[in-house]
Image (spheres, rainbow, N blue to C red):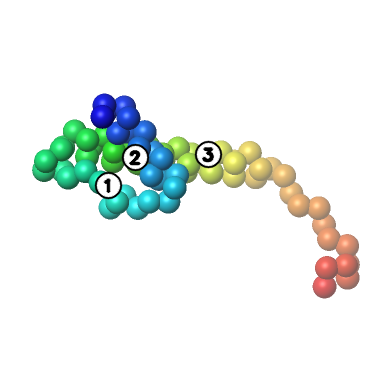
């Protein structure tokens, strides 16, 4: 498997909810594969956090409409 494919598997693992400790590669035996999988997992996590931060920034200027008195009590 190429490093790019291993990287993609790391990204997919993050999206599926696998923990970082779920890396299937041994750091001693396959250090390149271990690093590629870990990099993919970490990059997917960082991308998700950036998207979340952008959503917060985009919607921070929008205020919710005031609720009518008594309707949601």
Q: CA distance from mark 2 to mark 1?
A: 8 Å
Q: Determine whether, in the image, residue 51 is placed left or right of residue 33.
A: right
Q: Nearer the viewer, residue 61 or 10?
A: 10
Asked if disc 3 and disc 1 are in contact, CB closer than 8 Å, the reply is no
Q: Mark 3 — residue?
A: 51
Residue topped by disc 2:
10
Residue 14 x/y as whole percent = 40, 45
Label 1 crowd bin: few (<14), some (14–19), many (20+), radius 10 Å: some
- Which numbered disc covers residue 23? 1
Under circle 2, the secondary element is helix
User: On the rendered structure, is 5 left or right of 69?
Assistant: left
Q: Quadrant of residue 57?
A: top right
Locate residue 32: give its quadrant: top left
Q: Position of residue 12 (x, y in %)?
A: 41, 40
Disc 3 versus disc 2: nearer the observer: 2
Of label 3 and label 2, which has the lower sequence position?
Answer: 2
For label 1, the SS is loop
Q: Are marks 3 and 2 in contact (CB under 8 Å)?
A: no
Q: Nearer the viewer, residue 51 or 31?
A: 31
Q: Earlier in the sequence, mark 2 or mark 1?
A: 2
State the mark number for residue 31.
none
């Amino acid at each position: 498997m190429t490093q790019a494919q291993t990287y993609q598997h790391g990204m997919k693992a993050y999206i599926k909810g696998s923990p970082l400790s779920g890396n299937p590669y041994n750091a001693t035996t396959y250090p390149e594969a271990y690093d590629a999988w870990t990099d993919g997992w970490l990059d997917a996590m960082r991308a998700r956090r950036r998207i979340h931060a952008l959503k917060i920034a985009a919607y921070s200027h929008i205020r919710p409409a005031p609720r009518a008195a008594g309707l949601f009590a």
